[in-house]
Image: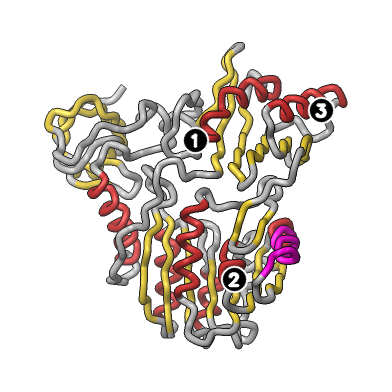
Amino acid sequence: MGDIEELEIAKLGAQADGVSERASGSVFVPYALPGELIRAEIQGTRARLVEVLRASPDRVVPPCRHFTACGGCAIQHLAYEKYTAWKRETVAGAFAARGLDLEVADPVAVGHGARRRAVFSASRDGREVALGFHAANSHDVIDLTECLVVDPGIVQVLPELKAFLAPLVASKGEARVTVIAASNGFDVSVDVDGLGTELPPGQRARLAAGAAELKLLRFSLNGDPVYQSAVPFVTMGAAHVVPPPGVFLQASADAEAAMASLIVEALPKRAKRAVDLFSGMGAFSFALAARVKVLAVDSDKRAIEALDEARRHAQGIKPIETKVRDLMREPLSRKELEGFDLAVFDPPRAGAQAQAEMLAKSKVPAVVAVSCNPATLARDARILIDGGYRATRIIPVDQFLYSPHVEVVAVFTR
């Protein structure tokens, strides 16, 4: 137990915590808002909100009854206009930390129920199995009965999915359950530590029968497709892409489409070729291929194979060439970048420092950086700007509604 004290909240931190400034340093209080006077139990630099003594006029009733128990959302209690301003300021602050005073647009909104991909946890307490997201600051799993951000079809199938998965959930540890609302149905992939993929024939048959009863398109266990009634696909531009189990997919189709549109808008006039770095399965490659020839590069061989297969069947697109390559270790060189009119990079959270350094030395007329981490994006932007690029647009995309995370599209020109 910590000390309970009254605190004045000065600002909202990058992780959506209220921040109180004391002589001993900053204290971070989840679910507190700027301007509020609160009572909180303090433990080091963290505190637990006990009572709001003076509420902010921007405090609203959270729309989901799981809020504060479920750790999936961090900030449903702030008025929407202030919420979007905070997301924009978070991005602007990351650039300012790199000495870049850039204009940041208001976030592109992605509404309720837009998450087509959700990663849940399943755990057991005696006979009871819980399926949902982790509780806030805990390993406990909140058994979800509703969720505002996830596709409603996914939420609706959760009770049946929980019963189906119960035999796979041990008394210790937990299962990781990825559900994708594909364009033609549900694709479910489960990872259970220590289980392996060599299942007894009887158990495999029971799982297949259960997946059929749930009308799943595909059910995979530890990467092994146990059951498939049809090929699940997601639409990317003119292509139908079949996602291999576990391969990265943007969480929201609406957010993906918004980012792809911003990228296509950045094509220079009379552009003929673009390179899509960290391309994944080709969400941006197929959008660009409606206009120009594309080279798609990624380290994930399965993602590139999925892109290639979809490319063969897509109609009305320009040629797409693919390459498997670890761009973190071996970025495309200045020489290899010659002849491209646009370069796009969408790396993992660590960013693309090595590739940004090569782009900064190149003559590519336009570069678009996409990132889920404003801090590493700002670092990479600094490299491009120091290399002679100018930032022309910085657009947040609120793909992860009510969370501290924000996707950003940044456009640069020579």
Disc 2 to disc 1, C-alpha distance = 32 Å
Identified by mark 1, the residue type is: Pro
Residue 389 placement (x, y as % from top left): 41, 82
Question: What residue span does the magenta drawing correspond to?
Answer: 305-315
User: What is the number of the mark on residue 276?
Assistant: 2
Residue 338 placement (x, y as % from top left): 60, 87
Residue 386 placement (x, y as % from top left): 40, 81
Label 1 residue SS: helix
Name, please, the residue furthest toward the front: 316
Residue 18 in which image quadrant: top left
Neighbour tally class for label 3: few under 14, some 14-19, many 20 plus, Cα within 10 Å: some
Tell which of 193 and 177 is nearer to you: 177
Q: Residue at x 72, y 36 (%)?
A: 219
Residue indicated by mark 1: 152
Neighbour tally class for label 1: few under 14, some 14-19, many 20 plus, Cα within 10 Å: some
Q: Residue at x 63, y 68 (%)?
A: 327
Label 3 residue SS: helix
User: What is the number of the mark on residue 204?
Assistant: 3
Find out whether residue 163 is within the magenta segment.
Answer: no
